Amino acid sequence: MQTIEQTKNEAGQKAWNKRPLIISGPCSAETEEQVVQTAQRLAATAKVDMLRAGIWKPRTKPGMFEGIGAKGLPWLLQAKKLTGLPTTVEVATGKQVHDALTFDVDVLWIGARTTVNPFSVQEVADALRGVDVPVLIKNPINPDLELWSGAVERVARSGIKNIGLIHRGFSSYGNTEYRNAPMWHLAIEMKRRNPELLIINDPSHICGRRDILMDVAQKAIDLDFDGLMIESHIDPDNAWSDAKQQVTPEKLAEMLDAIKWRYETAEEKEF
C-alpha cells in the first residue's frame, strides 16, 4: 500500500517529466475560493501540468502585499485534491520549506530575490537535506550566471536530484519594454553549461504586462525551452499583486493553442 508521501512524490515526478511542462496559477494566493476556482478552471483546460501560487511574496517596498502566508497552504492542498494538479510554491527560508512540505507541496522553487543571496540559498538547501522533492531555481535578479550556477550547486549538494531552471529575466537600468529584460543569451549559456537540467521560461515576470506574453512564450519555445510558467487568475484586473501580467485560465488556454510547439508530446495535450 502506497504512503501519502509516495503518492505525492509520484504525482510531482510525473508532472516534472512532462515536456512541454506547463505551470500556471495566481501570482498570489488570496482566498481559498480564488485558489480553488483558478485550479478548477486550469484543470478544465487540460493543458496545465502543475498549479503554482505565491504564498510568501518578497516585495520591493514595505507595505505592499507580501502574501497570505502559511494559512494559504491548505487551500493549495484542497485545490490539488479536487483537481489532481500537483502544486508548486516559492520558498525563501528553511521554515518555508518545512511548511510547504508539511502541506504536501510537490515541487519547490527558489525565487530570483533569493538566488541572489548565497546565505539564503544555503539555508533553503540545508532544509532540503534528506528530502525527495524537485526544486526549480529562478535566475538571480542581476545578470550573474555564477550566482545562478552557485545556487544550483548548493541545492545539488543537499542531495536534491531533480533540479530545474526558471528563466524570468533580469533587472537592467534603462530597460523600458520589459519588466525584466530577457537577456536570452544568458539563459542559453546557462543551459549550455547544464544540459542535463530542464529549463522553463517565465513570460509573466519578463513581460510585466499581458499584451506581450505570447511573443515571449513563442520565443522561448523557438529556443527549445522545456516549458513555461505563466500566471493566471480568475479576475486578473483585481489581483492583489501583479495584476497587469496575469491572464484568465481560458485566455491562457488560447495562448497555448496559438503557440507553435516543437515537442511531439505537445500533441497529447491537444494544443
Image: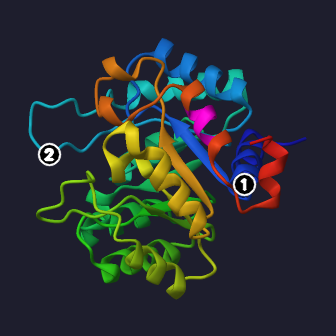
Label 1 environment density (alpha carbons within 10 Å; few <14, some 14–19, many ≥20): some
Kindly check if marks 1 and 2 are in contact, taking CB atoms under 8 A apart as contact: no
**Label 2 belongs to which residue?**
60
> Which secondary structure, mark 2?
loop
Residue at screen point 26% across, 57% down:
113
The amino acid type of the residue labelled 2 equals Thr
Q: Residue furthest right?
A: 1
Q: Earlier in the sequence, mark 1 or mark 2?
A: 1
The vertical placement of 250 against 185, above or below, is: above
Q: Is residue 91 left or right of residue 4?
A: left
Q: Residue furthest bottom?
A: 193
The vertical placement of 224 against 128, above or below, is: below
The vertical placement of 235 against 123, above or below, is: above
Residue at screen point 38% across, 78% down:
186
Place of residue 129 in the rendered image (x, y in percent of width and height, measured from the top left): 51, 66
Q: Quadrant of the C terminus?
A: top right
Q: Is residue 180 left or right of residue 168?
A: left
> Which secondary structure, mark 1?
helix
Place of residue 7 in the rendered image (x, y in percent of width and height, measured from the top left): 77, 43
**Label 1 belongs to which residue?**
13
Place of residue 263 in the rendered image (x, y in percent of width and height, measured from the top left): 75, 61
Q: Quick one: 242 or 87, which is closer to the camera?
A: 242
Place of residue 37 in the rendered image (x, y in percent of width and height, measured from the top left): 56, 16
Residue 62 shows which numbered tag? Answer: none
The amino acid type of the residue labelled 1 equals Gln
Residue 265 appears in which quarter of the rendering? bottom right
Residue 209 appears in which quarter of the rendering? top left
Q: Is residue 104 magenta?
A: no
Of badges 1 and 2, the one in the foreground is 2
Q: Is residue 218 left or right of residue 202?
A: right
Region rendered in magenta:
252-256
